[in-house]
Image (cartoon, coloured by chain):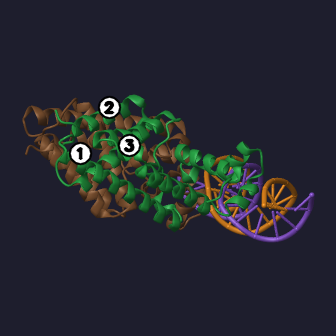
Chain colours: A brown, B green, C purple, D orange
Amino acid sequence: MPTAVPDTRTRILDLAEQLLLTRGFNAFSYQHIARELGVKPAAIHYHYPTKEDLGTAIIGRQRRRLGKWRGLPRLTELSPVAQLDALLEVYLTHLRQEQRVCLFGSLAADFRTLPEPMQRELRLFNRELTAWLAEVLTAGRTAGALVFRGEPVAKAAQVLTTLAGALQVARVHDEHQFYLIFDQLRSELLPE
Amino acid sequence: MPTAVPDTRTRILDLAEQLLLTRGFNAFSYQHIARELGVKPAAIHYHYPTKEDLGTAIIGRQRRRLGKWRGLPRLTELSPVAQLDALLEVYLTHLRQEQRVCLFGSLAADFRTLPEPMQRELRLFNRELTAWLAEVLTAGRTAGALVFRGEPVAKAAQVLTTLAGALQVARVHDEHQFYLIFDQLRSELLPE
DNA sequence: GTCTATAGTTTGATAGAC
DNA sequence: GTCTATCAAACTATAGAC
């Protein structure tokens, strides 16, 4: 593991991620990043040779983040409801940051135009996230703290899909529409 | 009302809509349409001067379709549950047509890069659809045929969001994932 | 090791041919 | 009225300067 990541590499990745989540993969270019960094577009290619490399790196980093996050004692020690709320907090944070959608919601519509490595990485990311949520839902239902019908995996997929969609709705309309869906979702999971 | 729409105009609109729903707005070009029609890209500009015009026309047509559909006696005479199923059938049709997402799900991620007329038209489309579904849900709950918590408008927004998201999930993973979410959603709306 | 000059495509759009 | 030749700008990417 490198002790000191070259700062420019990380700055590029941060900017690219921001652009991806606010504009979409096919609507940002190396020029956008270069201008912000005060550098020529070609300079970006030194750090990330192709846009495919850049896109794959963004998803890969989020996958690694998710992997670490899942394992944090500060998270795993929480009750299932609190773990669910920790997840919901992530989506609220996205909403507050210039109406970002989530990674999945940003890439799904353009999916068929994405390079294959990006497709593969996104599938893995979503699968891992769904699996984690399914575990939380299972534990929550067993403890009587969460209520829902059917299989935990199906419910997990539904919840994540709704959250991704809710961020998209917020972008098209406004925050209020997001909270409407968000509160509806949460209230249905908690016992009356 | 024109009795005979010039065929080329409609063919262009059909192709553009297909491309929009399968690739996304920023990932299709006049060249895609022109090649399919056996004509030069510039020819498209005669019928739709700018891409903004073309995009707005696609959404406008779907709005008009929705307006007519809502008013069809064959639909309005149905029970609320049957009306809901008629809506769900639309999403199933999208799924079967080369993994198309719905109009909203296609444009939401790219929303901030869209010309304003397209943004306005999409907001109207989504508002009208949500209002209609809210009415159906209200009638269904009154009749005891549908069950859900909270306000019908909130539930309507949640349902549409989930459906839009489910089509995106199908694209990233497969049909099975769509049906998982779809069945979960439907079963939660029907009395046990 | 890091960046710039530059190339080769593709884009959306205009002017003008038929 | 319909389409083509052509353009200017933006795109991703390579080769080479410092």
Determine the secondary structure under disc 2.
helix
Q: CA distance from mark 3 to mark 1?
A: 14 Å
- Name the side, left or right, on which B129 lies relative to A146: right
Looking at the image, can residue A74 be seen?
Answer: no
- If the image is split into quadrants, where does the C terminus of chain B sit? top left
Residue shown at the point (42%, 55%) measured from the top left: A21
- Name the side, left or right, on which A124 lies relative to A134: right
The residue that label 1 is drawn on is: B140
Q: Position of residue A27 (x, y in %)?
A: 53, 56
Determine the secondary structure under disc 3.
helix
State the mark number for residue B87: 3
Looking at the image, can residue A66 be seen?
Answer: yes
Label 1 CA crowd tier, 10 Å (few <14, some 14–19, many 20+)? many
> What kind of residue is marked 2?
Leu
Chain letter for mark 2: B
Q: Position of residue C1 (x, y in %)?
A: 53, 52
N-terminal of the two: label 3 or label 1? 3
